[in-house]
Image (spheres, rainbow, N blue to C red):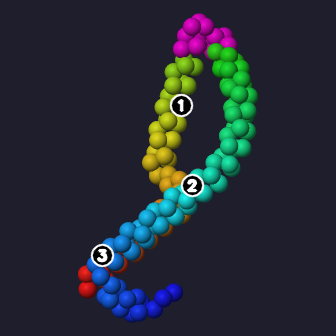
Amino acid sequence: MADPSALDEDLHQRSIPELMKALANETTMLVRQEIELAKTELAERGKAAGAGAGMLGGAARFALGAFFALTAAFVAAIALALPVWLSALIVAVVYGVVAYVVAQSGKKELQHATPLIPQTTQTLKEDIEWAKTAAKSAKK
């Protein structure tokens, strides 16, 4: 890493147009690097997610079939004591309550989710701090 005092001295010897041009070039390069990093992170996550999503899709089809069979069994069991229409209504209301509770839990979890591109987010924060430091030393 370069000596900070030598860098400070170099900055003081350059004219304002030179400094502005250097800042513009470095900012452009930094933005391009951040975009490339974000693309790389998203591509890596996308490949892994694609395979997992395919497997989950297949599992969901079988789970749905099992769910329908279980629902029919619940309605049939309750229908031994009550009319069929009332049995189906009771099962539907219970499912509705469960769906509401699960949806609220999912909503809460999504609100606390981490960013999709954590490394890019971190480096952007570091870049902002660098820019603030550079701006302060340019004012001196």
Query: Callout 3, which amino acid?
Result: Pro
- Residue 88 inside the magenta-drawn segment: yes
Numbered circle sitting on residue 39:
2
Mark 2, other Cα within 10 Å: few <14 / some 14–19 / many ≥20: some
- Residue 59 inside the magenta-drawn segment: no
User: Disc 1 versus disc 2: distance between alpha carbons?
Assistant: 39 Å
Question: Residue 81 occupies which quadrant of the picture?
Answer: top right
Determine whether the residue tagged by mark 1 lies in a helix, strand or loop: helix
User: Disc 3 versus disc 2: distance between alpha carbons?
Assistant: 33 Å
Numbered circle sitting on residue 98:
1
First to last magenta residue range: 76-89
Asked if 83 appears above or below 92 in the picture, the reply is above
Whether residue 37 is visible here, answered yes or no, is yes
Q: Position of residue 13 (x, y in %)?
A: 32, 89
User: Disc 1 versus disc 3: distance between alpha carbons?
Assistant: 65 Å
Whether residue 114 is visible here, answered yes or no, is no
Residue at x 38% of width, y 68% of height? 24
Numbered circle sitting on residue 17:
3
| Magenta span: chief secondary structure | helix
Quadrant containing the C terminus is bottom left
Q: Residue furthest left?
A: 139
**Of residues 25 and 84, the one drawn nearer to the viewer in this rendering:** 25
Asked if 57 appears above or below 52 in the picture, the reply is above
